Amino acid sequence: MLTLGVNIDHIATIRQARRTVEPDPVAAAVLAELAGADGITAHLREDRRHIQDRDVHLLRQIVRTHLNMEMAPTEEMVAIALDIKPDYITLVPEKREEVTTEGGLDVASQIQRLSEMVSKLQGQGIPVSLFIDADPVQIDAAAKIKAKFIELHTGCYAEARDEESQNKELAALAQGCQQAIAAGLRVNAGHGLTYWNVFPVADIEGMEELNIGHSIISRASLVGIERAVREMKQAMWGKF
């Protein structure tokens, strides 16, 4: 059954705007799980712009579903991950100047380095997912370095402004999902998904989990996180 991972980064964004203690992303994770979230996602960025080290340590202690730690493929982050031991890790590209992650990780250009990193993490029992575009070359590279998962970047689909473009991007995601499964990879997806565009992606055969943050937290600011999570799960099944 398709599951929902709730990304709580933007709760931390609000907190860090005032460098205070609230709202607490750890409390948000508890409420999201009580509302039916199947997992919690948090991105510990190198510049610590939102999620902090304290957050991921506490999340590891309190999350009862599964904790997905997003991180850049750096030695610093690998050391933190090996200490925290999240349920799985998603390696993402990261640039200091970007507002949010702008595209998928270029796995094909750094196969040796990423292979060593994936082997080190998975050797310690932490499955690794790679956040990549639905590009056949990148999917083949992800399989080559023996990652357990990929997370397909849905940003191009989410940003499509007309039906033809949206259908083209959706078809690429569906084709990428099938290619990945055939190569032995498990498939998640995320980025830019909202209550109004999530169902076609959720309906792709073989998709396991959608990781969604901004849309849920935006709605939560108006209706509360419990309702926002419940309604996203309804939207994933075309019932919103």
Image: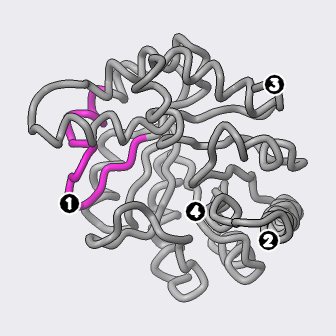
Decide: is 85 above or below 116: above
As helix, strand or loop, the secondary structure at mark 4 comes to strand
Choose between 120 and 204: the one closer to the eye: 204
Residue at image position (66%, 37%) is: 195
Q: In the image, residue 21 lies at what x, y percent?
A: 13, 26
Q: Earlier in the sequence, mark 2 or mark 3?
A: 2
- Label of residue 62 in the image: none
Find disc 4 in the rendering and name its residue: 130
Distance from disc 4 to disc 1, alpha carbons, whole Å, reads 21 Å
Residue at image position (37%, 41%) is: 9
Q: Earlier in the sequence, mark 1 or mark 3?
A: 1
As helix, strand or loop, the secondary structure at mark 1 comes to loop
Find disc 3 in the rendering and name its residue: 239
Find disc 1 in the rendering and name its residue: 47
- Specify the amino acid type for callout 4: Leu
Magenta region, residue range: 42-58
